[in-house]
Amino acid sequence: MTAISFLHCADLHLDRPFSGANRLPNSLHEFVRDSAYRSLRRIVDLALSNKVDFVLFAGDLFDTSYRSLKAQMTLLKELQRLHDAGINSYLSHGNHDALDGEWVNLTWPESSYFFPSNVEAIPFERNGKRLAHIHGFSYPSRHVNEKMIDQYNRLEEKTFQIGMLHGNLEGQTEHSSYAPFSLNELVEKGFDYWALGHIHQRAQLLEEPPVIYPGNIQGAHRKETGVKGCYLVTLSEASSYTSFHQTSDVTWHRQAIDLGQYETMQGLLQACEELLDQDTYASGGHLIEIELIGISHLHTQLLQEDQLEDLLQALQLNRDMEENNFVWPYKFSLKSKPAWDREVLKQQDGFMQDILVTSDNYVNNHFQEALAPLFEHRRARKALESIDNQDQLMKEAEELLLSYLIENNGGDVK
C-alpha cells in the first residue's frame, strides 16, 4: 500500500476559560486566554509544512455545545487553510460539544468532513486512488455510555483503516466512562491506527498498532501540566512512525522545593527565584505552582495567616514579563510537614491527644455541617472559594492549631 501521512489532534476546547491563575497581570490575560487558538494555528502550520494528506480532529472541538461564533470562525479559517493546500480534515464532536447544542450554522470547506452520530467509514483518495478509510462518529448528546467500539468494523479493502474514537479506556476511573473500550477490543478490529480523544494527558497505549491519546492542545488549569500539541503519523505497509509535536505556548508546571533545606524565609525566597530563572523556562509562557515539601520549622510559620500569600507576592514582584515570554508563579502548595512528630503527640495523654483523635474521626458530614453557616451567609459566601481538597484543609487546620499550642508550651514534643 502507498504510504500516507497525517496529523492527529484532539480536545481543542476552543473558548475554554483558564482557571487557577486569576491574578495574572492584565497585560497577559488576553494572551493566555487565546492560547488554544494559537495552538490550533500551529497545528495547521505543521500540517502545511509537512504536506500531510489529512488532519484528524478527534472530538471536543469546542468547550460546550453552545459554541461561540468566534470559536467557529477560528476553526473555519484554519480548515480553509488546509483546504486551500489540498489537505483534507476529518472531525468529530465529543461529549463537550455534542450535536444537540445550539450554534450559528456555517458553510465549511468541502474537504472537511464532520462525522454524524452513527459510526461511518469515509474513504480518503489521492490522485484518484483510494488509500485509506477513516472511521468515526460524533456524540449526539453529552452522555454516550454505550460501547461504540462495537460499531467499528474493518472494510474488506486493501486500504489503511484508521479509527477515530473519543472515549475512555476501561479501568480509567478518574475520567467519565464515555464510549468505553478495552485495548483488546481495539486490537481485534484489525485497524492500522487508533486516533483517540477525551483524555487530556497524552499517552501511547500501544505501539502496534499505534493507539494514541494526543492529549488536549492547550492546558487550561493547574492539573493539565506539561507541553501540549499533536502527533505526526506516517503509515506504510511495512511500518508506522509517530512523533509528538508541541504547539502550545503556555505551559502549566508543578515544581517541588524541599523546605527543610532552608533556615530562613529569605533563603527560601532566593531558592524560588533561582527555580524560576532556570533555562527550562527561557521561551514561551510558563505558569508555575511551587510545592513546598520536606520537614522544616518554617512549615508552622507558613501556616500563619497570609504568610504564603506574602511569599507569593514577594516572588511575583518585579518579574520580567513579556506577552509571549514570561514565567509567572501563581500558587504555593504547602505539602511539607512540621518539625514535630504527629505520632509522638498522639501517644501523649491530654489535650493534644484529644485533638488528634478528634481530627482522625472527623467525617465529611461534620465538615459540611461546620462550614454551612459560612456558605449560607449572604455576604460571607461571596468572599469564599470552593473547597477542592477537603482533606488538605483539615490537615492545615490541625497543624495550625497544634503549632499555636506547641509554641506556647502546650505540648511535650520531646
Image (spheres, grey):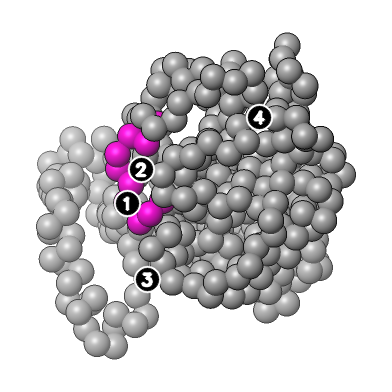
Q: CA distance from mark 4 to mark 2?
A: 27 Å
Residue 377 is situated, as x and y percent measured from the top left of the image, at 22, 83
Q: Can residue 274 be seen at all in this image of the molecule?
A: no
Query: Which label lies toward us, 2 or 3?
Result: 2
Instruction: Identify the mark nearer the N-term, 4 or 1.
Output: 4
Quarter of the image with the C terminus in it: top left
Please name the amino acid that badge 1 sits on: His
What residue is disc 1 on? 143
Marks 2 and 1, how far apart at CA:
7 Å
Asked if residue 126 can be seen in this view, the reply is: yes
Q: Describe the element under mark 3 as helix, strand or loop.
A: loop
Position of 265 compared to 282: left or right?
left
Residue 147 locus on image (x, y percent): 33, 34
Residue 318 location, quadrant: bottom right
Query: Alpha-carbon neighbours of circle 3 within 10 Å: few (<14), some, or many (≥20)?
Result: few
Mark 1 vs mark 3, CA separation in Å: 29 Å
Q: Say which element carries label 2.
A: loop
* Residue 132 image label: 4
Residue depicted at 59% across the width and 75% down the height = 69
Q: Kindly check if marks 2 and 1 are in contact, taking CB atoms under 8 A apart as contact.
A: yes
Of badges 4 and 1, the one in the foreground is: 4
Q: Which of the image's four quarters has the N terminus? A: top right
Residue occupied by mark 3: 385
Q: In terms of depth relative to the viewer, which is nearer, 296 or 328?
A: 328
119 to the left or right of 87: left
The quadrant in which residue 344 appears is: top left
Name the amino acid type tagged 2. Answer: Tyr
Q: Badge 2 is on which residue?
A: 178
Which residue is at the front of the view, 314 or 150?
150
- The amino acid at mark 3 is Glu
Do the residues under discs 4 and 3 have CB atoms within 8 angstroms?
A: no
